[in-house]
Structures are given as C-alpha cells and as structure tokens.
Amino acid sequence: NHPPDRRGQLYDLLGLPNAVTLARGGLLAGLAGFIPVMIQPAVVWIPSVLYGTASALDYVDGLTAKVVDRRSVLGEKLDMAFDSFGLAVAPTVAILWKQLPVWYLIIGIARYLFVGVISYREFRDRPVYRLPPSRVRRPLAGVQMVFITLSLSPLTTLGQIRAIAVVVLLPSLIIFIRDYLVVTGRRSA
C-alpha cells in the first residue's frame, strides 16, 4: 500500500462542489482583469460571458453539493466570498464601460456591509441569528445576476439600463436590510 499523493488528498478535501466554486472564482478574477481595460470591439462580449458563466456556476455548485451530499463550511464561505466579489467586480466593470450608473455599486457595498456585520458580531462574540429560508432571496439574487450579465453585454446602453437598474436594485436592498435586522436580532424571522 502506498500513501495517497497530496493532490488526491487535496481533491478529497475540496470535493467537486468546491472545485466548481473555485472555477467560479477564477472566472470572476478574470472579469476583474477587465477593470483597467478600455472597451474594445474585440473583447466587448468577454465580461458578459465571464460573469454569466460564473453566475450559472453559482447555481451548479449548490446543486452539486446537494446531489453528492457534500456541503461544507468551506463551500459556504467560498460561495459567500465569491458572491460578494462578483457583486463588486461585475458592476465596477459595467460602470467603467459606461453600461451601469455609478450608484449601482451600492449593491456590492451593501453585500460587503452585511457580511462585515456578521463577521464583526462573530469576532465580538455577539449573537448572529440564522436567516430562515426565504422564497425571495435566491430569485432576487438570480435577477441581479441576469441583470448584471445583460448590463455587461453590448446589447444594452446606459440609457436603457438606468431605469431598469432602480427596479432591480431596490428589492435587493430591502432584503439586505431585512436580513440585517434578522441576523442582529432586531427583527424576528
């Protein structure tokens, strides 16, 4: 019997769902590389494809974790980190490419504030109340992902997107506020 090689151990520790999540992170890192790039016809579709694929993988990693029964704390933390990163990077690229209004960055800021409040409360040994299942949280996240994917594409202009952005942004901000009140114990679930 030979001891397992380190790659095999690492893969066993990570598992398929986390590998999918890491692939999503790689796509988002690639998208971040477009922050300093000026919009050019040769690359105009790449940010939309990167973010759209990363968004699809967000669904796939959760589904894979359920199917193979491989949910983990690492997977949850990676998923949360990449959700936050994506909500910061994708709108930033769209804003710099004049596809989204600058005020849309509030969605990424809200996400980081929410995660930061939870981390701060955990660090201070304050209670963090569990969020109950929600029928609207995931669908709203999906709407955000589709909207941001479209805003990154050359199919839309800032003028077309501006009005839709308000309609898409407000419900998500309301959910962040509601969830903040629940995790801090200021509102019951």
Image: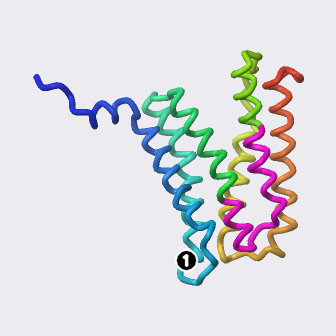
Question: The disc labelled 1 sits on which kind of residue?
Answer: Val
Q: Nearer the viewer, residue 112 or 180?
A: 112
Assess whether residue 91 is covered by the magenta stretch.
yes
Image quadrant in which the C terminus is located: top right
| Quarter residue 155 falls in | bottom right
Region of the chain picked out in magenta, as a range: 90-113
Where does the image place residue 169, in percent across and percent down from the top left?
Answer: 82, 53
Name the residue nearer the viewer: 151 or 134.
151
Q: Please tell me whether the stretch drawn in magenta is mainly helix, strand or loop.
A: helix
Residue denoted by label 1 = 43
Residue 94: give x, y in percent of width and height: 70, 67
Pick the quarter of the image with the N terminus: top left
The image quadrant of residue 47 is: bottom right
Colouring rule applied to residues? rainbow
- In depth, the one of 67 and 167 nearer the eye is 167
- Label 1 residue SS: loop
**Residue at the image position 81 percent from the left and 52 percent from the top:** 106
| Residue at left offset 59%, top offset 77% | 44
Where in the figure is residue 143, as x and y percent of width and height?
72, 53
